């Protein structure tokens, strides 16, 4: 949440039609969610993106998502964060954002996610392989590193799946 304090949320556009002022509170509720219904109530869906179309708040949220992955989170919350992170790095700017002068929100989200590249590789290595792999595929700008880690980690994931 320290990351959230650095952002001027009321100046950012949100997918819900309001400013981003409510995002830090929603994000905090998501991190503390203990049940599926609490996760659903605190979702960032409709705020950072609508049907893979991104809004301005997605960029600072991306940084918060990566930072939060380093915390001790429940499994359902961790998966929700990874889902949101994938939406941020794989989406594209909503047409209203393009008109407002923000045509590359996805690129900005990828740059923000890249700052936590080793956190994303840690997620890949420790149980959230496919979501983290999809995120890394769009974020890691070193294709040789990605290919190397992917080859090493995908074998680990396959072996783990066979054991279960």
Image: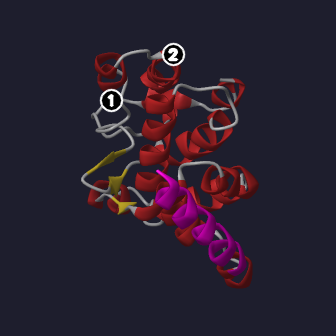
SS for callout 2: helix
**Relative to residue 45, is residue 105 depicted above or below?**
below
Residue in the foreground of this view, choosing between 152 and 79 = 152
**Relative to residue 56, is residue 160 depicted above or below?**
below
Q: Quadrant of residue 112?
A: bottom right
Residue 63 in picture, x, y percent from top left = 63, 44
Residue 59 in picture, x, y percent from top left = 54, 48
SS for callout 1: loop
| Tag 1 residue | 18
115 sits left or right of 41 in the view: right
Give me the residue at 52% from left, 61% from top: 135
- Quarter of the N terminus within the rendering: top right
Residue in the foreground of this view, choosing between 77 and 30 = 77
| Tag 2 residue | 32
Give me the residue at 48% from left, 66% from top: 104
33 sits left or right of 97 in the view: right
Instruction: Name the chief secondary structure element in magenta.
Output: helix
Give me the residue at 63% from left, 73% from top: 150
Give the residues in magenta. Answer: 148-164
Would you say residue 56 is visible in this rendering? no
Residue 41 in picture, x, y percent from top left = 30, 20
Residue in the foreground of this view, choosing between 25 and 124 = 124
Give me the residue at 71% from left, 58% from top: 117
């Amino acid at each position: 949440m320290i990351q959230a304090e650095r952002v001027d949320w009321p100046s950012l556009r949100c997918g819900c039609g309001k400013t981003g002022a409510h995002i830090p509170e929603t994000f905090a509720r998501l991190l503390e969610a203990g049940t599926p219904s609490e996760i659903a109530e605190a979702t960032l869906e409709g705020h950072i993106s609508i049907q893979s179309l991104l809004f301005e708040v997605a960029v600072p949220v991306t940084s918060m998502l990566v930072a939060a992955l380093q915390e001790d989170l429940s499994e359902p919350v961790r998966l929700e964060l990874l889902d949101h992170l994938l939406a941020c790095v794989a989406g594209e700017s909503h047409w209203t954002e393009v008109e407002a002068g923000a045509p590359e929100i996805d690129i900005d989200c990828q740059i923000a996610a890249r700052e936590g590249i080793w956190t994303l590789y840690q997620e890949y290595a420790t149980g959230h392989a496919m979501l983290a792999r999809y995120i890394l595929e769009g974020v890691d700008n070193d294709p040789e590193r990605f290919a190397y880690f992917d080859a090493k980690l995908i074998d680990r994931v396959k072996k783990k799946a066979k054991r279960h």
